[in-house]
Each structure stands twice: as C-alpha cells, then as structure tokens.
Amino acid sequence: MIDKKESIIKQLTQKPWESAQVKVDNLHEGKTFNLHVGKLGLRYIMVVSTIMFCLFIVTYSDRMVYDDWVRMPEPFLLWINTLILFISSFVFIRIQLAAKKNQFEKTRRDLILIGILALAFLIGQLLVWQNLVEAGYYVSGSPANGYFYLFTALHGIHLLGGLIYWAMTIKKVWNINNIVIRKAKHTTELCAIYWHFLLAVWVVLFGLMLFS
Amino acid sequence: MFVVLLVLAVVLGSVVFHMWSPWWWSDIASNWVGMDDTIILTFWITGAVFVAIGLFMAYCIWKYRYDKNKKAEYEPENAKLEWALTIITTIGVIALLAPGLIVWNNFVTVPKGAYEIEVVGQQWGWSYRLPGKDGILGTTDIKNINDDNPYGLNMDDPYSLDDVLIDGDDLHILNNQPLKLNLRALDVLHDFYVPQFRAKMDMVPGMITYYWFTPIKTGTYEILCAEYCGTGHYAMLGYVVVDEQGDYDEWLSEQMTFEEVLASNGKSDLIKLALNKKNDF
Amino acid sequence: MAADSYDDVAKSKDSIPALEVAPQDLYHAKSFWTKYIFCQDAKVIGIQYALTAAAIGMVGLVSSWLMRMQIAFPGLIPMDAAAYYQLVTMHGMIMVVYLLTALFLGGFGNFLIPLMVGARDMVFPYVNMVSYWVFFLAVLILAASYFVPGGPTGAGWTLYPPQAITSGTPGGDGLGIVLMLVSLAVFVIGFTMGGLNYVITVLQARTRGMTLMRLPLTVWGIFTATVLALFAFPALFVAGIMMTLDNMLGTSFFMPAIVEFGERLSYDGGSPILFQHLFWFFGHPEVYIVALPAFGIVSDLISVHARKNIFGYRMMVWAIVIIGGLSFIVWAHHMYVAGMNPWFGFFFATTTLIIAVPTAIKVYNWVLTLWRGNIKLTLPMLFSIAFIITFVNGGLTGLFLGNVAVDVPLSDTYFVVAHFHMVMGIAPVLVILGSIYHWFPLITGRFLNERLGRIHFWVTFIGSYSIYFPMHYLGFMGVTRRYFEVFEGDAFTYSITGINQFITVAALITGAAQFLFFYNIIVSSKLGKKAGKNPWKACSLEWQTPDVPPTHGNFGKDLPVVYRWAYDYSVPGSDNDYITQDTPPSAVANAKAEQT
C-alpha cells in the first residue's frame, strides 16, 4: 500500500502515458484523500452553507454602509440562546470523548441533553422574534430587521436539519452492537462536528449584528 | 465526405454573408467612432481565426479520413506547439483588449464643460430635464413626487425652479456639444439607447447613472428602450433631435421651466415657498 | 527519450488483483417501485433526470416556436405582450437550468461517473435518489406556475428587480414569480445533494489504478462543473430568498423607493444592482457549468472516433480547471452597461479576455486531435465537428461582448441573443445529441437508426447555424432584444421582416427535427440494430462492463483494475488500434507507447 500523498500540482503534471508513471499509477488505490466519505460529505455541506452565509454577509455589509441604516436592538434573550449553543457544543465534546471510550451509556444520556438544548434554543429564538414583533420591529421595517429575521431563520433551519441527523445518531447509538459500533461512533462524530459548525456560524452572525 | 463540403460551405458562406449583408450598422451620429473601429478590428482578428480553424479542420477531415489499413499517429502532446499557440493567442487577445480599454477610458471620462441634462424613464415613456439659465440641475428625491412635482424636485434647492421640464415631447440637443446624460428611473430598470449614438447605459431606480457623447450630425433619431422593463417595453420609444444653434434656441425658448409649470397649475404658494428658500440661500 | 513502455512493467508484474475493499452497501431493489421509480441506482437516476429534463425541455422548445412566430408572423398565433414575455422568460429559464444543467450533471453525470471511474455506484445512493425527486419537485413547481392566476413570471430569465416583482410585469404581482423563485431554490437544494455525490464519487470511489490523470476528460468536465455549481448556486439561492422576502414580506433588500404608475410603493433603500451581482455571480459560472461537461464529453467523442489520443491531455485538464477558476472573476461583464461603477469595466474586460486563452487552447487541441488521426465519420463525430464550428463561432463573438467598449453598442441587442445561443445553447446541445448517439448502445444495447440520425444531423446543424448566424447582424444594426412587436426602426439599414421570417422558418424546421430524434430514440430502443459489447472500440471503463447494458453494481463480481490512461488509441506495435484501460500490460506486450 503506497500512501505517499503527492501535492495536487504534482498530480496534475503527471504524464500518464510514460512508462515510469505507469508503474507508479498501477499501484494507486483510487482515493484522493485519506478520509471517510461521510466526513468528506459533511465538509461539502459545510462548505456550501458557509458560502451561502458568506454571500448574505457580503450583501449585509454592502447595505450597512448607507447612512439610513438603523440598528436592531439585541434582546437579552439572545445572549441566553447563545449560551445554550455554547453549552451544546461543550456537551458534544463530552459525547465525542465518551464515544471514543465506548461509554455508550454516557453518550446516550448526553445526546438526549443535546436534543433538549436544541429545542430550548429554537423556542428561545421564537420568543426573541415574538418580543421583537411586539416591540414593533417588523421584518419590513428596515433592512437591519430584514437581515436579522433572515439570519436567525436560516440558522434555525440548519439546526432543524441537524436534528434529523441527530435522530439518526440516536437510533444508531441506541441499537448498539458489535457490528455497528464503528458506524455509531462515526455518526456521533459527524453530528458533533456539525453542531460545532452551527455554533461557529451563530457566533459570526451574532457578532456581525452586534457590532454593526 | 459531404461533411467536408459542409464545413467549407459554412465557413465560406459566413464570410460571403458578412461581405454582402445589407444588415449593418447605421451611419454613426456621435463621437464614438472608436467603438466602430474596435468592432472592425475585432472582426478582422476573429474572422481570420474562424476561417483558419474551419479550413484546417476541413483539410484534416478529408486528409485523415478512416482507412482500416492506416493507424493514427500516437502523440500525447507537443509542448512546443501548444506553447506557441498559447503565445500567439495571448498576443491576439492583447491586440483586441488594448484598443477596447482605451475607448472605454474615454467613455467613462466625461470631459469638463459637458452640458448636463437629465433623462427620466418610467413605464413606459421618457421625460427630460434641462438645467435652465443657471446651468445647474436641481436635486431630486423620489419621495417628493406628486402630481404637481412629477420629477420629484427638491423645493428647497435654489437650482430647481429654473429647470426646464420636457414631459411627453421630443428631446432636442445641440450639435457638436459634449453632452452628459444623467439617467434616472422612477420604477424599474430602463436603458436610454439611440443606435446611431452607439452609447447606452441602464437607468436604475434609487441611483443616478450617466454617460456622455457628442452628437456630430443633425437629424431626428429614434430612442429605443434597451433594458426589459415590463409589458410595455417594446413600446417605450421616443425621438431625440440634433439641432444647430438657431433651431435649438428657438425650441428651447418654447419650453416651460419648473416655475412656469407650477404657476400654470395655480400652485403659486409652492413657488413662494421655493423662492423664500432661494433667498435664504 | 524513447523507452520501452510496457515491457518492463509486464515482466515485473502481470496483473494486479483488485483491492480488498469492503463490499459497498448496495441497495438491492425488490419491487417495481424501488427498481424503476424510487431507485437508488445512479444509471436509472441518470435516465430519470434525462427524461424529466427532456420533457420540460420540450415546453422550452415549443415556447421558442411560439415566440418566433410572434416575431416573424405577428397575429398568426394570437398573443398579447404579456404572453410573449412569459414565453421568453420560461424558454430561457427552462433551457438553461432545467434542461442543460440537469441533463449534463444529473443525466450524464449520474450515468457516466460511476461507470467511468470504475465504481459500483455513487457513494451516497440514497441521497442521490432524493436529489432526483427534489429536482422533480422543482420541475413540478415550475410547471404549476403556468396554472396560477396571472400565469408564470414574464420578468426575463434574469429576473431583475424591481420589474420582476412589480405589477408592470406579467406574473410580477401574482404567484408566478413566487413559484419561479421557490422552484429555483428547490432546484438548488436538489442539485447540492446530487453534486455531493458527483464530487465525492470522483474523489474517493475510483477503482484501483485510476489516478486523477487517467480519468477521461468527460469526468474532468463534469467534476469541475459540479465544483463550480457548488460555489455558484448558493448565490442564486441567496438572491432568490431575498427577492421572495421582498415580494412576500415587503422587505427592501433589492427594492429602492419607487413610484410605479403614479403610486409610491412601500419599499425603500434596497439596491437592484446588488441582485444583478448575485445573479451573475451564479449566472456566469452557470455558463461553464453547462460548457465544461460539453468540453469534456466532446473531447472523448473526438478521440474515440478519430482513433487517436486526445491531443495535449494535460493542457486540456489544466484548461478545464483554469476556466473554472477564472469563471468566478468575470461575472460583471454581464453588467458593463448596468450602471455599476464604470471603473469595474477595466478589470472585468481584462479577466474576461484572459479566459479566451485557455478556451482557445481547447479548440486547438480538438482540431489537432483530428490532425493525423484516422477519422471515422460516425454520427458522434459529425456532431462533434458541428460543435467545434458552432463553438468557435460563438466563442469568437464572445470576444466582442467581453471587450467592454465593444459591448456598449451591442449589449441588449440581438447580437447578444445570437452569441449566447451559439455558445451555450446550440454548442452544448450538439454535444448532447452526439453523446446520445455515442452512449445509446451502452444504455440500451442497440444503435440509433443511422439514416434518421444523418437527417437529424444535417437539419440540426444547418438549421441552427442559419438561425443564429444572421441574427448577429440584426444586433449590429441595433435591433433591441425582448421586443414584442418587431418594427422597422429608423436606425435599421435594411428591412428586418424577411430575415426574421427566414429565422423563424429555420427554427421551426430545426425544432421539428428534434421530434424526429425523439421518434428515433423510442423506436430504436426496441428495434434498433444490436450493438454488442464496446461497439465503438473505446478505451474507457464504461464500455468494459461484463453485461451490456451494465446491470446493477456495474462491474459484476470484481471491480476492474486500471493499467493505463483513457486514450491508448493506435498505440504503435499493438495489434488493435485501441487498448482498453483495464487491459493488463502482459496482454499487449508488443505495444510501445511513444514518449514526447
């Protein structure tokens, strides 16, 4: 098994018809990265949604510089919701460690906790919306309002999508046996990465709205 | 082997069509001869490439047609040839780009002393505003628009009252005078385009865009809206007339200023308001 | 250096056994429903994509007929301006997104990628199936917009605000535009799922010996296009969502304060140009999302049917990658006269013309592949030749429009219409047609009828060239596009009535020829001449499956092992004029590969 990773430039300048190259190539395993497809797939999804959020942020900062920009207030509840996301990420780190050590009892307990936290976050966000609407900050009121509702909604949808994957993880971790143990660990790992990603996205969005 | 003839016919047919086509641009009536020249230059370079590739391909198809006793050449690449072609192409591209950028630089650099007028587009017609005696266009805001003030002029702008409004009539411009068009749209995108002037630019609600040109030939020219603007887009036409000084002055003297328009509508209170502001200024 | 090529390899090791890989979790269909409807086999999904795209594409084709009728023979088919603009819009949107993108990536991508890289299926078959059904839903939503009050949107395929969502545009104040935007958003979601599969299958699921540089250019083209889509489609998604909110909830992302028909709307402070930037940040790469697969596929068609390796394979790969990269920094060349900062013109004109260089290299290499080849004038080859002519023509007129000063008089005229139809309408479609003639024997085990195919070729090529070549000259005259009533403008040096009628007749005939083609497909799939295995004597893996057509799992018991690149045609010393990719060196010990 040859696993000397060649740089992408080097790979793209190979002459596949030359005999020396043929000998090397015949032993190639056919994989570009030494990575599980699931992990690569998750990265793909994170790249796509990062691009999407970046484009929103670009348009946001483009709009922000006009002098008719009116800021949105940040209800205190948002800080609590942010805290909830931080706690979720922390819990997921514990889950990752527990799963690594095959402590599935602990993993299960903490996964349930994640579900509760996620629901709390979503309900919290809805409450924030309700407060703001009651205070007269409608979505069409000003561009800042529009962006606020848009950002929170998209982030919420991402979390909902994450909950689907969370349910699949629960299913795997609950019916654990020797055959699927690797799979369960793998799924847990991916789920954790996604949750950290959601925290990062939220921190960026919240920070942006806070400091604009 | 008919396909060889087909390739030849397409290549040569294109050249013949180009030479004999009665569909060609109308005589230019502005200073943008440089645009026409760049097009002609582009035609020569791209035409040569098109003919060369077509003929060479026809030759290859004929010369290297299938023969089961023959074998194709085995040649994965030929670095020298490929680099040579790359360099030649790059030179060709630079030859196209350089003059194009020079013309564009002229296009975006409005000469000092250009006469500024405003063109307003709305679904589906054109109106115009000239700066009047003070030579300066009053500022506008879309929020001011109402029946008395269709252009949305700012009442507290001292340059507003003498602006000449041309609503529902042809625009006249002076021959050989550099002209900067300030373009404004009230509802959706439009584009003020006169084929003989070659230039065009979209009009975007919420902002003022512009371009400039110098008319060089008197006559009446048709305006076409060149940016899709809804169901009536195709009917958004108009005329612009290029006059010599005498005709132009006569036409201008017949037009009404903003003040006169307000007066004719019996809105003297508005005029008074504006005049007070003007004195404050 | 000329060295013995495969001899020493042959001596040292005969054939390398397939890797000990864990058997992929292939889903085995149990019923009709899971085999043909909710199927997870990429080949079936590819065909589903292709059929759906073709079906909605017919709506696009008929739309173009109707609008050409209005242009040339007004009144013959009664329609008002609103209906005309709805036809124009739906024609554009369907052809670009729902036909070409879906067909190249969803159709060809699904069918060919696993076969060409030597995989049993895509890496995430379930996601792949969902991807198709989400696409299908997007098509249904699009079709539904025909049946809502006010009809589909008539905003032009670019959907520029403010007109897209104001009452002066057909469908602008009804559900038409909403359904359009929702359909696009759904399409993007479905496509992202598909793209996930294409990218990761190419990267991670290749068979043993299949290095990146041994991949056929078809895979390179589809792969790079998918990566482009990965970056570009989010922009469309973002723009679509923001415009939907502007329309439904009254936000002002893209809507400035406007007065429409004397009435002040409640919007304030948005920027219409921002939408255009987002749209073209998607829209320009979109051109290459369609073009790059065509580039890749046509390279393979030319190589197979000229019995010669593709000339300058490495340059071809680099060109695909470079074009893909550059396509993200040229988008504003669609906006030279849109009112953006005029100084952007210098930058975008320069980047745009730089793209001409790698594109030209591709053209040279196609022609140089024909040079000293042994050219079989099969139908795929004929369509490839037609593609080169059309693409060169359309590419060269791109040098007019990309050069900012030349674009000023030509933008928004029929020159633009002619240019983009040549370069991203006709040219990719010629490749699609050629490749269907090429791969039909693999899909069904039978050839398409040759005689019908020849008629189809002649009519399609001559017809489409006659439509679009003269159209450029209308543009020079200043005939503006998107005019419901074509009229003899003062600026026009010659009547445009006759030429418009000629173009319309050519369009009707060319379109009719496509129905002949559909007939050929239907009849030949049952009655066509049996093709047998590898009828074109091609090297790449998709033709080396044990069964033709390939069955579920593609490669039977063992995955193939790859011993050479995809272009070992006419290797000196070998008995045949091709050596397939999975032929071990010992089987062709006499063959010598020449070195350069």
Image (cartoon, grey):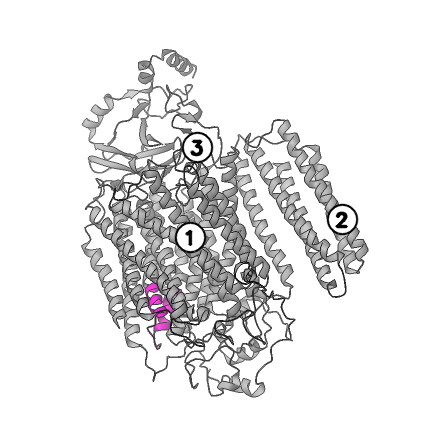
| Chain designation of label 2 | A
Residues at discs 2 and 1 in contact (Cβ within 8 Å): no
> Which residue position holds label 2?
A112
Residue at 44%, 39% (x, y): give it.
C148
**Residue at position x 47%, y 53% from top?**
C328
Label 3: few (<14), some (14–19) or many (≥20) C-alpha neighbours in 10 Å: many
* Residue A196 appearing in the image: no
Q: Could you tell me the amino acid type at mark 2?
A: Ile
Q: Which residue is mark 3?
A: B206
Which residue lies at the image location 74% right of the left edge and 66% below the top edge? Answer: A179
Instruction: Tell me the element at label 3.
Output: loop
Q: Is residue C367 magenta?
A: yes
Magenta region, residue range = C361-388
**Residue C425 showing in the rendered view:** yes
Find the distance from the CA under tag 2 to the CA under tag 3. Answer: 52 Å
User: Does the magenta portion include C21?
Assistant: no
Q: Image quarter for residue A205?
A: top right
Q: Could you say where residue C161 lies in the image, as x and y percent from the top left?
A: 44, 38
Residue behind mark 1:
C56
Which image quarter holds the N terminus of chain B? bottom left
Give the SS element for disc 1.
helix
Q: Chain of mark 1?
A: C
Q: Is residue A154 above or below residue B266?
A: below
Q: Are marks 1 and 3 in contact (CB under 8 Å)?
A: no
Q: Nearer the viewer, residue C589 or C357?
A: C589
